[in-house]
Image (tube, rainbow, N blue to C red):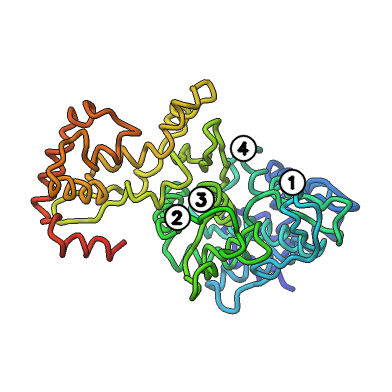
Amino acid sequence: MPVTSVSVYLSADRVGNNVLNQVSPEFVLNAWLTNHTKVAKSIHFAGDHYSGDWTTWPDELKKHLADRWETMVKWYGQGMPPPDPAPFPDPLQRDGECDEQWGNGFVVSNDHGRHVYLSHVANGLALEMTGKLPWSIVDYSSAHLRDLFSMDNWMELAPPDATIAGYVFEELMSPATPAHVMRFFTSNDLIGTSARETIARLFGWCKILIHWTAPDAHPYWGPDAPPIPSSMLIDGSNYTGTNPPTFGRYTMGCGGTCEFMKSVLRAVNIPVEDKTPPCGHVMPHFPTVNRTLSHGDDPYDRLGWITAFPGWPVPELKEYLITIDQWNAWFDPSIDPAVMINNVGKHMGEIAVKYQSDLLLDAYCEDTSAAADHASGQVFAALKTFYTLAELEAMQLWDKLAAKAAATSYCSSSVRQRVQDRH
């Protein structure tokens, strides 16, 4: 196939003319990786008969990667036309079983595991080399590149007791195809002008997620869960624990939301680290943009939801992210877990106070109707994990709630109903 079949879709600024002038798509990819050794060494494959980084791969394995890369370059270059590339079943199906301590006993065959891995790496390299995304991977640290491209970071060979030779997933989520994830990002306008803005937009989308009720995963995501298919959060699923089943986008709590973000952001070249401090809750870290969350459940924590009213500000989505320094101040291992637990979700409390959130306004209306004082009312009950009564009174919270409620007629039943309908 002539090189012009892909070179026209590549970014000269990202790739360089010396690479564009290679005689075939495979040579183009190989030349770029040879020029970017840090990236090449982060691409680590693990198989039954061979394991190693791209610089040591057999020619056949390099060819398999190049073929998938060429497919994705053309797909992006031609405007993502249907049908979407589908290199593996989505959701992934169980091919075999093993002891549940290994990837929850969910085994995919060697072929499926290889397809999943190579397709993901091919997609990441295609995004980089076409310039489809505003951010680049070339300045990422080796550790962050391994988060994106090393098979060891999310898949491993199934144990000897498996009913089929293959792979298990070390993560809670099984991946959707890269094309499925990119459709999700583009159709929901989630690709921003920077990685940080993209994370913030994804946070906003995640407000629609519904927290599951433990302990049985099967009514939410089917008999093979976990792992939970990322596509079932993207597209939704029917909860069969009710009659009739109830459609929704269900998440396995803070850990599930963290792993979902990790899975889909990996497909757009944004590494995510899941952190579990001694308090036991899970939070996603976005190390390349120095941001994180105060809790994996923050997106759908109604304490932080604010409806726009004329003349009253609402937070930008990026305000829901905190710096890693702030996270360390709240969750450093040296902090007493009994104190640390009160910092879980704290940033939603800060947002709620700053903008007089809908939940606080609802509580204020109820307290006013019941003639409750500050100490015994629902407003303080919603915030007492994070603030003392004296702190809230010093911030004049009740005066601000009164002003906003009066200006927006919030305590009228019609306004409160409209707000509830929006949520």
Q: Is residue 255 above or below residue 163?
A: above
Give the CA separation, mark 2 to mark 1. 26 Å
Q: Are marks 3 and 4 in contact (CB under 8 Å)?
A: no
The answer to whether residue 99 is left or right of residue 381 is right
| Residue at (27, 66) in percent of width and height | 421
Dot 1 amino acid type: Asp
Q: Position of residue 71 (x, y in %)?
A: 67, 69
Q: Is residue 177 above or below residue 317?
A: below
Viewer-side residue, 159 vs 15 = 159
Q: Which mark is residue 237?
A: none
Give the CA separation, mark 3 to mark 2. 16 Å
Closer to viewer: mark 4 or mark 1: 1
Give the CA separation, mark 2 to mark 4. 23 Å
Query: Within 10 angstroms of label 2, few (less than 14), some, or many (20 or more) residues?
Result: many
Q: Quadrant of residue 240?
A: bottom right
| Residue at (82, 46) in percent of width and height | 52
Closer to viewer: mark 3 or mark 4: 3
Q: Of label 3 and label 2, which has the lower sequence position?
A: 2
| Outermost residue to the right | 49
- In terms of secondary structure, where does tag 2 sit? helix
Give the CA separation, mark 3 to mark 1. 25 Å
Q: Position of residue 70 (x, y in %)?
A: 68, 66
Q: Are marks 2 and 4 in contact (CB under 8 Å)?
A: no
Whether residue 183 is visible to the viewer of this picture, yes or no, is: no
Q: Position of residue 43 (x, y in %)?
A: 73, 48
Q: Disc 4 marks which residue?
A: 141
Q: Disc 1 marks which residue?
A: 152
Dot 2 amino acid type: Leu
Q: Position of residue 104 (x, y in %)?
A: 72, 53
| Residue at (35, 42) in percent of width and height | 348
Q: Disc 2 marks which residue?
A: 202
Query: Within 10 angstroms of label 3, few (less than 14), some, or many (20 or more) residues?
Result: many
